Amino acid sequence: MKLDDAICYAAMLSHDTRFDGRFFVGVLSTGVYCRPVCRVKTPKQENCTFHLSAAAAEAQGFRPCLRCRPELAPGNAMIDAQSRLAQAAAGLIEDGLLQDLTLAEMAARLGVTSRHLRRVFVTEFGVSPVAYMQTQRLLLAKRLLTDTRLSVAEVAFAAGFGSVRRLNTTFIERYRMQPTALRKPRAASTLPTTLEFQLAYHPPYAWSAMLAFLAGRAIEGVEQVEADRYHRAVRISHGGKDHLGWLTVQQVVDRDALQVTLAAELAEVVPLVLGRVRRLFDLGAHPDDIARRLGGLAESQPGLRVPGAFDGFEMSVRAILGQQITVKAARTLAGRIVQRFGQAVTSPFPDIQRSFPEPATLAYCSPEQLAELGIIRSRVRAIQALAQALIEQRLVLAPGADVEPQLAVLRALPGIGEWTTQYLAMRALSWPDAFPHTDYGVRKALNETDDRKVLALAEAWRPWRAYAVMHLWRQL
């Protein structure tokens, strides 16, 4: 994509939040790059250059502004096919997965060649995937140094540098400062003992609606919505071991961001945890773009998001359990699975006690063990088939996967019909155009039962049909 200098400069003059994260401004007179919402004195237009990503700005020799902090800019939703592919790759990089995957392996996961992925990525972000990864590592290190008590060594490893020497060298080369310089303005006593981060979003955000949706589906022992906060247990397998801990998410009162608090035990997997939080709370959405497409349907609840999945397997099992029974009954069954098979987690919240079991645990247990929990045999088969598909890597239940092949795999599994397939596309795959046209609530809101007519009515909402579903459900 190309940037229009006049439009970018006008957005910068007005500090337009709609453009935050969509481009970055390099200032020739200072050598610094900023977000368009930065509140420092606005430079003259002839001193400004505009870049598709933070990585593109750094590739031109600019270093990040210490005031607006480019690492805090919100992400962007995936729209057209090329943009969706590039954004999916960027998401994998931001989650720290390029450290475990080669570019060729990442391309294979996304269903394209590495050459095509690189070409699309450069078009979208202005730099190669490898250059983008280097910038993301630096920006994560900058955030950890600024916002946490982690030692420089812990920061180096959490950000993927592998050694303090490599972190120091890269920081000096790119930012012309020592990493420890970021800690001088703040006394150690003022830094939080837990890991605390702010994740920005594009306003508006229907926070109460999001919490109500998650509260109604929270799995006992794993998740809890308390007042205006979301708590959950965390288990992430990475680097050959399980990382267990907890997190809390709440809305920041005076800015367009969510406050995320993590247990210190999750320091080594910060990128992975924050990536999952972004997906769960749909922080990359652009509400204005979506509202323009949905028209009057979206007027009553501005900023309504599509809840994603912190863990695709966990969410999928709960969805299977919920087939043809009440939401409350499905929660009860999911809670029994957690109590029987989940790992213990220590947290400051009495109701957060265990993590959801991994696919292998449920795939290789006996069907009788699941049936004893009150789960009917057909759903036991569906859960175990789904888990086996994940283990064999025939199925990926995370954003970034090529959608159509994943939908085909889901449809071929026993007990997975079209409703479940589309619901998992909405939440586990974060596909904005997913549309469960057979859903009872959707049909009731549209006052239509014929499949073809339901789909025809939804054509006007492409490519945001998943958001239309959330608004239709609210009408019930």
Image (spheres, helix red, strand yellow):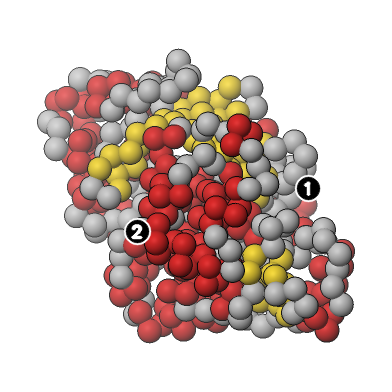
Furthest residue to the top?
Answer: 350
Between 418 and 67, the residue placed more toward the observer is 67
Q: How many marks?
A: 2
Residue 203, above or below 221:
below
Left or right of residue 148, residue 112 in this image: left
- Residue placed under numbered mark 1 in the picture: 299
Which residue shows up at 34% across the image and 30% down it? 355
Mark drawn on residue 162? 2
Between 245 and 476, the residue placed more toward the observer is 245
Q: In this orientation, does residue 327 appear?
A: no
- SS state under label 2: loop
Left or right of residue 397, residue 140 in this image: right
Which amino acid, mark 1?
Glu
Report how far apart the C-alphas of labels 2 and 1 lie in the structure.
49 Å
Quadrant of the drawing holding the C terminus: top right
Which residue shows up at 34% across the image and 80% down it? 113
- SS state under label 1: loop
Between 457 and 108, the residue placed more toward the observer is 108
Residue 120, above or below 340:
below
Mark drawn on residue 125? none
